[in-house]
Image (cartoon, rainbow, N blue to C red):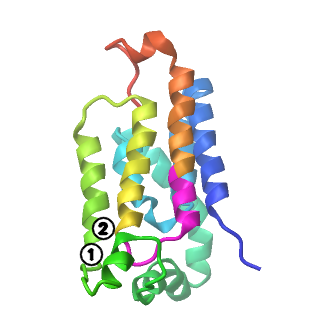
Amino acid sequence: MYDWSEPVVVFLFASVVFVRFRFPSMAPWITGLALVGKQYLFLAVPILLRRWRDLLKASIVAVLVTAPFALWNLKDFWRSLVTFHLLQPFRDDSLSYMAMLARRHIYIPGWLPFVMGAAVSVIAWRKRRLLPATQFAACALSLLVFFAFNKQAYCNYYFLVIGLLACSLASVAEEGPLQRHTESSREY
């Protein structure tokens, strides 16, 4: 039986929201754990990890979590993590614009979703100050664009987008009205 892994990733991102407001020093570590949940979450790295020291902490967690699997069999690890997904055939039953356009004999290149998702991430990264709610919303937008134009996208993919939007709403509720409207709010 196959199960979706997205609920686990949503739980990890909800944990990131929790620790950002209750235990801020733990936030980069938990963020690193959340980011290794799915291969395409590399798009969220420049949005969520804006300082070098936070990126370093998250990278340490990412390496500690994935290294045992990689060291067990590096060739199979790479194949299941990257090669398998790049070589998967196009699915015309996908919930994406690529599939919709292909049914009308209009084909878009496979690299386009990567460029579009990365463009959203870069635009968000260029903003100097992003509140946590905006960061999660930007992650959701980046993944939404990535999925909407990809060769394979199904309802479980969009479940993650909805989960990130819920994290954004939770962050707004946690920030409070004064912090949202002041220039002195913390940057994560």
| Amino acid type for the residue under numbered disc 2 | Phe
User: Which quadrant: the N terminus?
Assistant: bottom right
Element carrying mark 2 = helix
In this picture, is 16 found above or below 161? above
Task: Return the residue at label 1.
Answer: 111
Q: Are marks 1 and 2 in contact (CB under 8 Å)?
A: yes
**What residue do we see at 62% from left, 81% from top?**
72
Q: Which residues are magenta?
A: 150-161
| Amino acid type for the residue under numbered disc 1 | Trp
Query: Where residue 125 appears, x then y in whole percent?
Result: 28, 43
Task: Return the residue at label 2.
Answer: 114
**Circle 1 crowding by C-alpha within 10 Å: few under 14, some 14–19, many from 20:** few
Front residue of 5 and 29: 5
**What residue do we see at 30% from left, 28% from top?**
129
The reply, left or right, for residue 102 in relation to residue 4 is left
| Residue that lies at the very extreme toward the front in this rendered image | 104
Front residue of 136 and 12: 136
**What residue do we see at 66% from left, 48% from top?**
11
The reply, left or right, for residue 65 in relation to residue 44 is right
**What residue do we see at 35% from left, 39% from top?**
50
| Residue that lies at the very extreme toward the right in this rendered image | 1
In this picture, is 87 found above or below 119? below
Query: Where residue 70 appears, x then y in whole percent?
Result: 55, 76
